[in-house]
Amino acid sequence: MRQYPEYGQEIGPPYGVIFTAEAMRKSLRPQYDRQLRKHPIKIDFGTDVVIEMDYSDFIRRYSKKQNELKYVLAV
């Protein structure tokens, strides 16, 4: 992991996902506001886990095999 002086801490995987999804939402928000409310952003890193981030910044982690919710992180 990298140390970023402007954040004062290491940026781990959950924060990287948050920053990525936030950048995607901010770039799409004016035109696609209604679609982002209906359909959350899903990020698949090629592992057995899919991370889903909805419009209100809730992060859900799903297992592909069992399609079960692992945890929810509110930002």
Image (cartoon, rainbow, N blue to C red):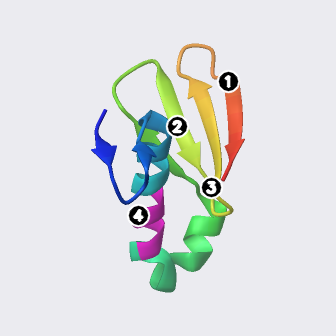
Depth check, front residue: 47 or 6: 6
| Magenta stretch: dominant secondary structure | helix
Kind of residue indicated by mark 2: Ile
Query: Dot 4: few (<14), some (14–19), or many (≥20) neighbours within 10 Å?
Result: few
Where 61 sits versus 25, above or below? above
For marks 1 and 4, give the CA distance: 23 Å
Q: Give the crowd class for mark 3: few <14, some 14-19, many >=20 residues within 10 Å.
A: some
Question: Badges 1 and 4: C-beta atoms under 8 Å apart?
Answer: no
The disc labelled 3 sits on which kind of residue? Answer: Asp
Residue 3 percent location from the top left of the image: 31, 42
25 relative to 71, above or below: below
Examine the structure image and report whether residue 19 is included in the region drawn in magenta: no
Residue with the mark numbered 3: 54
Determine which quarter of the picture holds residue 61.
top right
Q: Which mark is residue 24?
A: 4
Question: Residue shown at 43%/51% (left/top)?
Answer: 8
- Could you say whether the residue bearing mark 1 is in a helix, strand or loop? strand
Q: CA distance from mark 2 to mark 4?
A: 14 Å
Q: Earlier in the sequence, mark 2 or mark 4?
A: 4
Residue found farthest to the left: 2
What's the distance in space between the residues labelled 3 and 4, CA to CA? 11 Å
Point 32% across, 50% down: residue? 4
User: What is the magenta range?
Assistant: 21-26
Residue identifier under label 2: 51
Q: CA distance from mark 1 to mark 2?
A: 10 Å
Residue visible at 48% across and 45% down?
15
Mark 3 vs 4, N-terminal side: 4
